[in-house]
Amino acid sequence: MTTLLDIKNLNKSFNGHQVLHNISLQLEKGEILFLLGASGCGKTTLLRSIAGFEQPTSGEIWLKNQPIFKENLNVPTQQRKLGYVVQEGVLFPHLNVYRNIAYGLGDGKGKTEEEKQRIEEVMKLTGISSLADRFPHQLSGGQQQRVALARALAPSPELILFDEPFSALDEHLRNQIRYDMLQVLRESGSSAVFVTHDRDEALCHADKIAVIQEGKILQIATPKTLYWSPQYLSIAKFIGDSIILPATLKNDSIATCQLGEIAIENKGNGHTQGKVLFRPEQFSLAKKIQDPTASFKGEIKRIESRGRAINICIDVGGYELNINEDLINEYHTGEQVTLYLYGKGVFYHDK
C-alpha cells in the first residue's frame, strides 16, 4: 500500500504545557483511521495540526511524500488540499446547498461545466440531490452533515479530517448518518482521519485505531487486535467491558487465578505475577459448537434485564463474574450453574 500521511515525532505545547508527546503514525491510501481517547487527551489538537490550524512545536508531517510541516516549513491550510468536517457541519447560512458545495471548488459559484458535473456527482453520492436549492436553516442536522461531507468531497481530496462529526446528532440519526457517510468514503476511495471518544464507533468502522492518552499514542492497531490483544490494561479497560483477575503463571500457556487454571495466549517474559484479561462474551452458560477451554461451577447472584439481553452476576468460588446472556433461556437467582469459558486470556505482568 501507498503511505498517504506520515507523522514523525510530533510535539505540541501550549504556554509551556505539552499536549502532544512524540506522536508518530502512518496512514495508507484508502484507510480510515480513528483517533480515540477521552476529552482533553490531545486528539483534536493532533487533527488540527494535520489540517494546519495548529502549528506543532516540533516534528514533521508529510502528505503524499511531501512535507507540509517540519523545521522552517509550515504549509498554509488552504494549500494542503484537505477536506475538513466539524461537529455541526458549519455551512454558510446565506448560501443554498448547491452554493455551499461549490464553495469548495473555487469561487463558490459552480458555473463551469466541470464544476457543475462534480457538484452533481457529490450530491448524488451523499444522497442530497433533491436539496440543492435549500438553505441550511431548512435542513435537519443529518442533512447538514451530508452537505458538509459533499463540500469536503467536492475538490476530490485524498484525505478528509473529521472532528467528532456525529456527536451532535441523536442516536438513531447518528448511526444512520455515520453508516452512510462511511459508505460514501469507501466508494469515493478517500482516506479519512476521525476524532472520537466513542469506542463502539471506532471499533465498528475503523481500519485502524490510535488510542491516545495524555497526548501520547499508546497503541495503533486494527479494531480486532485492539479489542482482543490490547498492549496495556488501561487500553483494555477503555476499549470495552473487561474481566480482570490477579493471576500467577504456571508455564508459558497456563495461568492460575481465582477461577482455577486457565489458558493464556501470551508469555510472561520472565514474570510470573500479574493479571489476566477476559472479555465478558468469552463466558457463557450455554455450550457452543466449539469446545470450551474451561468450565466452572457457580451460583447466580443477580439478574438484570437489559432489553435484548440479560446481565447475570455469577459467584464462582467467591469471585463474582458479570456476563451477558440472551433471553432464550430462563435463569433464576440462587440457581447452581456451569459457566463455560471460550478462548484464552491475555496475561499482563506486574511492573
Image: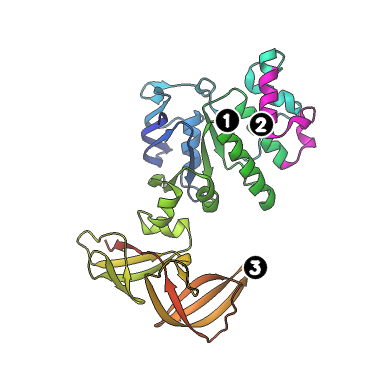
The residue sitting at 50% across, 71% down in the picture is 323
Is residue 127 found inside the magenta-colored segment of the image? yes
Q: CA distance from mark 3 to mark 1?
A: 37 Å
Q: Which mark is residue 299?
A: none
Specify which label sits upstream in the sequence, 3 or 1.
Answer: 1
Specify which label sits upstream in the sequence, 2 or 3.
Answer: 2
Q: Quadrant of the N terminus?
A: top left
The residue sitting at 46% across, 21% down in the picture is 75
Q: Is residue 135 visible?
A: no
Evaluate if marks 3 and 1 touch, with contact meaning CB atoms under 8 Å apart: no
The reply, left or right, for residue 257 in relation to residue 298 is left
The stretch of residues the image draws in magenta is 116-141
Specify which label sits upstream in the sequence, 1 or 2.
Answer: 2
Residue 14 coordinates in the image, percent (x, y): 44, 38
Q: CA distance from mark 1 to mark 2?
A: 9 Å
Evaluate if marks 2 and 3 touch, with contact meaning CB atoms under 8 Å apart: no
Badge 3 is on which residue?
Answer: 307
For this orientation, the residue located farthest to the left is 270
Badge 1 is on which residue?
Answer: 188
* Amino acid type shown at disc 2: Leu
The residue sitting at 50% across, 74% down in the picture is 286
* Amino acid type shown at disc 1: Ser
Badge 2 is on which residue?
Answer: 125
Label 1: which secondary element: helix
Evaluate if marks 1 and 2 touch, with contact meaning CB atoms under 8 Å apart: yes
Disc 1 crowd rating (10 Å Cα; few below 14, some 14-19, many 20+) is: some
Q: Is residue 350 visible?
A: yes
Residue 30 coordinates in the image, percent (x, y): 49, 33
Is residue 251 found inside the magenta-colored segment of the image? no
